[in-house]
Image (cartoon, rainbow, N blue to C red):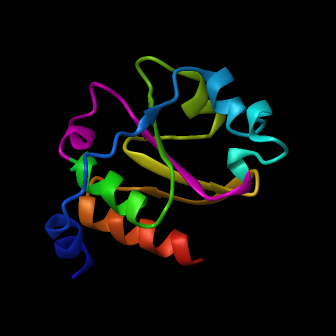
């Protein structure tokens, strides 16, 4: 199974890059340092969470990060406690929620507290 493959690989702990505010979120869609290429021109995922979210704390973030890294997908984390605006802007209605963006718009989303389901979803959006 793919999850066992991820666990058996000696992945360096992948860190999800935090999205600190709405301005940082918008930078993903217009990065002036990218020489004409925006981050949003390729597939990327944002994990919406909250520091107080108990189901979020039960997720295996290292395994989720490893799955995204294995597929070559950058993954960001947006914590509602430090950035209240962006989850509302993205119409996130509960935590944990994962949203995949590609070509400047939302491609797919998943609200789940099951690590295996999230990894399966990452595999799905990477091939779609």
Residue 102: image x %, image y %? 68, 58
- Horizontal side of 101 relative to 67 (left or right) equals right
Residue in the image at 36% along x and 72% along y: 120
Of all residues, the one furthest to the bottom in this rendering is 1
Q: Any magenta on residue 83?
A: no
Q: In the rendering, at what x and y percent does residue 12 appear?
A: 25, 50
Identify the magenta region: 41-58
The residue sitting at 76% across, 51% down in the picture is 104
Closest to the observer, 58 or 125: 125
Q: Quadrant of the N terminus?
A: bottom left
> Farthest right residue?
36
Question: Looking at the image, which residue is at 79% across and 31% down?
Answer: 32
Query: For this view, does 55 lie left or right of residue 47?
Result: left
Q: How many marks?
A: 0
Measuring 38% from the left and 41% from the top, which residue is drawn there?
95
The answer to whether residue 51 is magenta is yes
Establish if 31 lies above or below 4.
Answer: above
């Amino acid at each position: 199974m793919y999850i066992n493959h991820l666990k058996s690989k000696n992945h360096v702990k992948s860190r999800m890059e935090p999205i600190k505010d709405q301005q940082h979120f918008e930078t993903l869609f217009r990065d002036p340092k990218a020489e004409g290429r925006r981050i949003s021109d390729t597939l990327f995922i944002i994990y919406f969470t909250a520091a107080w979210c108990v189901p979020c704390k039960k997720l295996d973030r290292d395994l989720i990060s490893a799955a995204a890294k294995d597929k070559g997908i950058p993954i960001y984390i947006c914590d509602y406690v430090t950035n209240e605006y962006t989850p509302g802007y993205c119409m996130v209605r509960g935590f944990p929620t994962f949203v995949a963006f590609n070509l400047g718009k939302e491609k797919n989303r998943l609200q789940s507290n099951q690590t295996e389901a999230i990894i399966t979803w990452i595999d799905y959006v990477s091939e779609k």
